[in-house]
Amino acid sequence: MISTNILFKDLTKIITFPKIEWKDIKERLIQGKIVSTTRNSCGVKKKIFNVNEIYNTQWGSKIEIIKVEYFKDPIKIPTWNKMNSTMHKSIEYGIKMCGTDNLQWVHLKAVENKLPILTTPKELLKFMKLIKYDFHTDEEKYIIKSPEQLIQSRLGICYDEVELERIYFNFWKYQFKTFFIYSSDPKDEKPTHTFLIFKKNSQYFWFEHSWENNRGIHGPFKSYRNSVNFVGNIFKHSIGVKSVNVIDYNKPKDNLKIRDFGRNIIHNNNTGYLI
């Protein structure tokens, strides 16, 4: 559900490794291995790393922090005795600049942008908990993400998330439809939303992740129309309007901006409901 709320979130943080070790770290990350290394955060504009944070590296790939340990005494670092004098000096310089309270032993892994293998809607919903809502600041500049971009950034809006859902439901060979919902008043700038309804064993279910207050798999319903009526009534009450339009739409063009996305659906899809 697209909101006008704004959350400033920095996704451009760069983590830099000393030249003495970055090549080795890069190779191990490419191989899919978990890498453990010393970092006291001096290469990043913050002093403390937190689990699940994502950073860019100086060679262009992304890494995720999966575990953090703290050592006030560098001698206790697990690989201290295996490090050469250059690495010791690098750590000691970091302690001098940042203080021993910020000396960290950080476990890293490469962020994959490949779609994981999932077999059921419940597995997909659980996986999508990693994706947070993207409270973007400029609708004129926001480009709808591809499923791979969505997984890599872990930030998205309903428009992005439904396209990820579309891939899986197609792969599972479910019958399903995706819908775009908006205020029926053309002058109204209220929020819009996209969602997916799928059919299983002659019953219909609403799959919802992006709209946090209604996250889950809802149903069963008797038909697409019953499902859409249910979602439409919740939506129009949530945004405070008397009626809404709901349009059944197919996969949109790639790289659309938010406003173009809505216009494209309205102009190219004729199957709709007034609720």
Image (cartoon, helix red, strand yellow):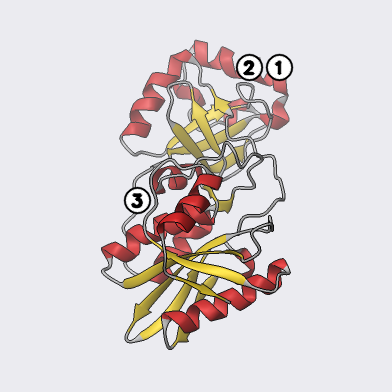
Which amino acid is tagged 3? Answer: Leu
Q: Position of residue 109 (x, y in %)?
A: 43, 39
Question: Separation of disc 2 and disc 1 at Cα?
Answer: 6 Å
- Determine contact: label 2, label 1, CB under 8 Å: yes
Q: Residue drawn 64% across and 19% down?
A: 94
**188 relative to 109 in the view: left or right:** right
Q: Residues within 10 Å of mark 2 (few under 14, many from 20)?
A: some
First-in-chain label (1 vs 3): 1
Q: Which residue is mark 1?
A: 96
Q: Which residue is mark 3?
A: 115
| 248 or 161: nearer the viewer | 248
First-in-chain label (3 vs 2): 2
Quadrant in which the N terminus is drawn: bottom right
In the displayed structure, 41 sits above or below 194; it is: above
In the displayed structure, 223 sits above or below 39; it is: below
Q: Which residue is mark 2?
A: 92
Which amino acid is tagged 1? Answer: Lys
Q: Residues within 10 Å of mark 3 (few under 14, many from 20)?
A: few
